[in-house]
Image (spheres, coloured by chain):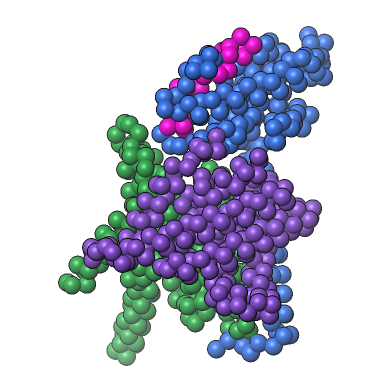
């Protein structure tokens, strides 16, 4: 049925098949590249727009992104300038390794004075029905952080003398959530609030 | 400490078979006897670790620099297939005894999705070479552990219990696997 | 006139016979050789991607797509491939189609792509695809191979969708994302052990139905 196998035709067949497959893949990759890039950028921008008040720059533009390596992973800071008050705010993509199911990633929006505006859950592997209540789509847990300033609001569960009401039966997930937000705030305070007048901000104020 | 966390997470909390559903086919197919599952488990630990290391090197020194990440699936599966062949040939020459024990399982490993799955997962998790090695080794051990435990349970099941006619074969095996998965769920949360 | 008419009738009958044959190939994949319940192949995605009906459906369709394309290609070029490099060649062809599906989904169905995650590239080691290439496509013509891919793919898709439907119904009290009853559901069915249990009981059900049909 199939052809005789000789070294020559075996090598040739494999080479031709691999070559054609690679060529096809390269073609499909070129065709889909723009769409895939667009999806990635849209996802980031959507998240930023959700957690921050209206802004009129492009926070995901390379100039506005700051990467900070902490605790073995990267925290991303997306700086934005608000439309109304023209002050510098930022969405901080943060993480924790202490979740019940391991790592989870949040996007926290901070206002100029450090107040938490909104929090979005990017990814997690917490137990459905228990720990996954950290997601505002499932439960109101994360809403209690809105409008609080971590300077005065202690980011720890009430069992540990903090100000956060933990999710019933999911203390580990709740503690991990606080850990992630605290990490985001630490980076935000160091890199945005303390520096205060980063280039974008000074530019905006001098124009007024 | 970090490595211990990776090891415990890969063996118990996110067990390849029972929590991530990688390598279910050999898990259900091969594991009737403890002795055979020991052989299969050993072969998988070996191939899985080796292929994760080789694919890590290929990803970071060939695919990423050339920006042909889309060739990942194709390259990885070819590398794994070639690696399995090579291990088979070398084993046959160097240690006929070991080849006798593991040999028949080797061809099956190419299509064991745990091998390709762990290789891709190590890349996705952005592990470095040391972490990849530890992670893949631990995942292989997790696979072997689940396989051997499951084989032991099924041996007992064949010996002692009367299984309803409709449940014989795969259905009862799946239920036993489900119970085992439930037992492993008890481990989640130990890596806080 | 009469002869011409007779010839037309005979071509129609012939076409109908061919069609019946093709339909039988498709039906065989759905029921008699159902990949999930009878052949017990491709168990990893079956268990891993069926936490909801829509996930099961998308995984099934992605696999069917790969299956049809790889069956077609292998039935066309299979005879030119030397015997000894048969399997590696098939794997390369399958891997190429899997990557095509992966890229297309990443670009145009990003949400499903991120839920199915690693199980899209893993279609390449799904035993169903390689098994059909080796046992059917390499020996049969292009048309039959496509229909075989369609049948087996549909059988796989139906099984996955049904399993996802059952798990979602019990685990989240919802159907295709629409909540039927408020509340959390029996969460176990969404978690790993529930996948094993649900598949075990569906398998029993399938065997019972099959036995009844055969008796008739």
Relative to A44, does residue C63 appear above or below in the rendering?
below
Which residue is depicted at the point 72% across and 85% down?
A7
Q: Position of residue B76 (x, y in %)?
A: 66, 62
Q: Position of residue A25 (x, y in %)?
A: 67, 61
Q: Nearer the viewer, residue B149 or B175?
A: B149
Q: Is residue A131 magenta?
A: yes
Relative to A204, does residue C106 appear above or below in the rendering?
below
User: What segment is highlighted magenta in the picture?
Assistant: A130-157
Quarter holding the C terminus of chain A is top right
Which residue is depicted at the point 40% across and 52% down?
B180
Relative to B13, does residue A1 appear above or below in the rendering?
below
Q: Is residue B162 magenta?
A: no
Q: Position of residue B91 (x, y in %)?
A: 66, 75
In the image, B115: left or right of A73? left
Relative to C135, does residue A170 appear above or below in the rendering?
above
Q: Residue furthest left?
A: C216
Q: Position of residue C121 (x, y in %)?
A: 58, 57
Quarter holding the N terminus of chain A is bottom right
In the image, A208: left or right of B81? right
Chain in green, by letter, is C
Which residue is depicted at the point 33% across and 52% down?
C198
Any part of residue B24 in sight: no
**Image quadrant where residue C171 sits:** top left
Q: Nearer the viewer, residue A170 or C9?
A: A170
Q: Colour of chain B?
A: purple
Chain in blue, by letter, is A
Q: Nearer the viewer, residue A64 or B18?
A: B18
Main SS category, magenta section: loop
Which residue is depicted at the point 53% across and 14% down?
A161
**Image quadrant where residue A82 sits:** top right
């Amino acid at each position: 049925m199939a052809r005789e196998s000789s070294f020559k035709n075996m090598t040739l067949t494999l080479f031709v098949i691999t070559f054609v497959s690679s060529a096809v893949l390269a073609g499909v990759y070129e065709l889909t590249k723009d769409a895939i890039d667009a999806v990635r950028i849209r996802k980031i921008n959507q998240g930023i727009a959700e957690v921050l008040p209206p802004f009129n720059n492009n926070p995901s533009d390379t100039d506005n992104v700051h990467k900070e390596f902490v605790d073995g992973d990267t925290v991303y800071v997306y700086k934005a300038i608000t439309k109304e008050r023209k002050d510098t705010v930022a969405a901080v993509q943060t993480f924790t390794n202490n979740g019940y199911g391991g790592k989870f990633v949040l996007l926290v929006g901070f206002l100029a004075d450090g107040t938490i505006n909104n929090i979005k859950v990017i990814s997690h592997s917490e137990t459905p029905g228990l720990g996954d209540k950290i997601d505002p789509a499932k439960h109101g847990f994360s809403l209690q952080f809105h409008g609080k300033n971590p300077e005065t609001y202690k980011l720890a569960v009430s069992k540990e003398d903090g100000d956060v009401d933990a999710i019933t039966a999911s203390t580990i997930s709740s503690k991990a959530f606080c850990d992630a937000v605290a990490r985001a705030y630490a980076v935000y305070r160091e890199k945005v609030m303390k520096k205060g007048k980063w280039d974008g901000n000074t530019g905006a104020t001098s124009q007024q | 400490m970090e490595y211990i966390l990776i090891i415990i997470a890969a063996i118990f909390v996110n067990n390849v078979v029972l929590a991530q559903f990688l390598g279910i086919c050999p898990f259900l197919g091969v594991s009737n006897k403890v002795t055979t599952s020991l052989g299969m488990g050993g072969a998988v630990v070996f191939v899985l670790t080796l292929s994760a290391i080789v694919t890590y090197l290929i990803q970071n020194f060939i695919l990423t620099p050339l920006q042909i990440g889309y060739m990942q699936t194709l390259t990885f599966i070819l590398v794994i297939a070639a690696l399995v062949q090579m291990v088979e040939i070398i084993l046959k020459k160097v240690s006929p005894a070991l080849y006798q024990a593991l040999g028949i399982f080797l061809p099956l490993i190419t299509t064991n999705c745990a091998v390709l799955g762990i290789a891709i997962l190590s890349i996705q998790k952005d592990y470095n070479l040391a972490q990849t090695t530890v992670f893949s080794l631990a995942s292989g051990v997790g696979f072997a552990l689940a396989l051997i435990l499951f084989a032991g349970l099924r041996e007992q099941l064949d010996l002692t219990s009367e299984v309803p006619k409709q449940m014989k074969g795969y259905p009862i095996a799946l239920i036993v696997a489900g119970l085992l998965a439930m037992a492993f769920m008890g481990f989640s949360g130990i890596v806080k | 006139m009469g002869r011409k008419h007779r010839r037309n009738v005979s071509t129609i009958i012939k076409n109908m016979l061919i069609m019946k044959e093709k339909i039988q190939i498709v039906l065989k994949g759905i029921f008699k050789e159902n990949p999930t319940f009878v052949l017990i192949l491709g168990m990893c995605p079956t268990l891993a991607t069926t936490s909801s009906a829509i996930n099961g459906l998308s995984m099934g369709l992605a696999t069917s797509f790969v299956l049809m394309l790889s069956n077609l290609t292998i039935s066309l070029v299979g005879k030119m491939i030397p015997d000894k490099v048969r399997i590696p060649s098939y794997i390369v062809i399958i891997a190429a189609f899997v990557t095509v599906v992966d890229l297309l989904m990443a670009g145009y169905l990003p949400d499903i792509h991120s839920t199915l995650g690693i199980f899209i590239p893993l279609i390449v080691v799904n035993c169903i695809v390689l098994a059909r290439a080796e046992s059917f496509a390499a020996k049969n013509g292009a048309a039959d191979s496509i229909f075989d891919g369609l049948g087996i793919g549909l059988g796989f898709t139906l099984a996955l969708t049904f399993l996802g439907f059952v798990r979602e119904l019990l685990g989240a009290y919802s159907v295709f994302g629409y909540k039927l009853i408020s509340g959390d559901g029996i969460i176990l069915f969404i978690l790993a052990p529930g996948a094993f249990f649900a598949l075990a009981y569906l398998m029993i059900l399938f065997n019972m139905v099959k036995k009844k049909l055969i008796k008739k």
